[in-house]
Amino acid sequence: MPETPDDMAPMIETAPDIRPVPRIAVQAFCESREVAAIIEAAAGDRRMAKAHVKVQMGGMNVAIEFYHGAPTPNLVVVETHAVREELLDQLDRLAEVCDQGTKVFVIGHVNDVLLFRELMRRGVSEYVVAPFGIFDFIRSIADLYGSTASAPLGRTIGFFGTKGGCGASTICHNVAWSITTSYDQPVVLVDLDLPFGTAGIDFNQDPTLGIVDALATPDRVDDVFIDRLLTRFDDRLSILAAPATLDRTFDLAEMSFDPIFDVVRASVPAVVVDIPHLWTSWTKRTLRQLDEIVIVAVPDLASLRNTKNVCDFLKQTRPNDAAPRLIINMAGMPKRPEIKPEDFARALELPILSVIPFEPALFGTAANNGQMIAEVEAKHPIGETFRSIASIVTGRSEVRRQKRPSSLSFLARLRGKAAG
């Protein structure tokens, strides 16, 4: 029977130990209305306020069919009445369409210890047997993402322009927006250009709080405090804005931003960082610590020189990391002598992720209206370029290009490791 408010009151009193669920995307596929109702009720609880939850009917087979044509979220929840062999076969087929890093939470109807062990061995993150309560479900998800032993949740993606005015911030903001719209994935955009940051105006926002408030009180930096400083653009994109004022100077220590990044990346799947065109101890440290670096350059000699210097620095300080991504922006400006993209890439021995043409009317209209490129002109090729960049820097594109794995690689697939 469904729980009545009176039945639920004692559970609420015994639930304060449940940690809040971070800002993740969750999709649930249910076979029974009872389980769907529990998940929907859990999604409305304050501890799940940051999570973006979708519930639909259909179970495992519907999930498999759905993800043949769509990216998987941070967490896939599937209910199944299947018995052992059928369930394992379903999981093998689900593994074939799972993106890298996706966790799978199985809700079953068989209380079998041997089955539980086999599912854990194959990489399933959680298995619970129905019926269960709202707080059982919330606690299970919170434990998946709240364990101190687990890796940080968020992927940090930084954009750095090698010349002033090369458009790195505009590209950064459009890619952040494209991640949320293309993959229904929560993103925090961090604007590190404290005196001149444009994240607020690019999204037509007027934030009263932002990153400088966290820098001013580092001892207060935790998930609750950072959450108060975020400016919500919509239910998926949040901005940790720069003050963009000149009433003070910002002479920061090398590790000033470390506590902020530690908190933000532990609570959201993707952190997109707009790094200003500066060369300080803290910008160097930020570049060294990012998961993914995108360098934005324009096709002239000064930008080529600067890009080579930055790449040399990154190669020396990040010897075990992949090379940065390279975007050539404002290509084809009338009457300007330019270095051809292929010559630019050859000089750097670095492939080009994308070449974005010079389109002053389109970008100017977007900037003046506080809109993204795809909002101004939905079918413009540059909007598709930003979606492609979003796919690559989040790791989606590489995953989709991989050959579908056999059932033996299920563990590696769900845990985001290379298949053996």
Image (tube, rainbow, N blue to C red):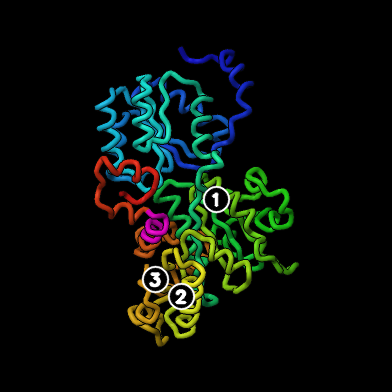
Observer-side mark, 3 or 2, equals: 2
Would you say 13 lies left or right of 333 here? right
**Mark 1, secondary structure of its residue:** helix
**Which residue carries the number 1 mark?**
265
Front residue of 358/132: it is 132
Q: Is residue 296 above or below residue 134?
A: below
**Mark 3, secondary structure of its residue:** strand
Q: Find the magenta span and give its range.
A: 387-395
Observer-side mark, 1 or 3, equals: 1
Main secondary structure along the magenta-highlighted residues? helix
Q: Position of residue 167 (x, y in %)?
A: 49, 71
Residue at (49, 48) in percent of width and height: 269
Q: Position of residue 290 (x, y in %)?
A: 51, 60
Q: Find the distance from the CA under tag 3 to the CA under tag 2.
A: 10 Å
**Dot 3, how many residues are within 10 Å of its Cα: few (below 14), some (14-19), or many (20+)?**
some
Q: Is residue 410 above or below residue 86?
A: below
**Dot 1, how many residues are within 10 Å of its Cα: few (below 14), some (14-19), or many (20+)?**
many
Residue 389 colored in magenta in the image: yes
Q: Is residue 391 visible?
A: yes
Quadrant in the rendering for residue 409 = top left
Q: Position of residue 318 (x, y in %)?
A: 49, 67
Observer-side mark, 2 or 1, equals: 1
First-in-chain label (3 vs 2)? 2
Residue type marked 1: Arg
Say whether marks 1 and 3 touch (CB < 8 Å): no
Query: What is the number of the mark on residue 89?
Result: none
Quadrant in the rendering for residue 350 = bottom left
**Which residue carries the number 3 mark?**
356
Residue at (43, 50) in percent of width and height: 181
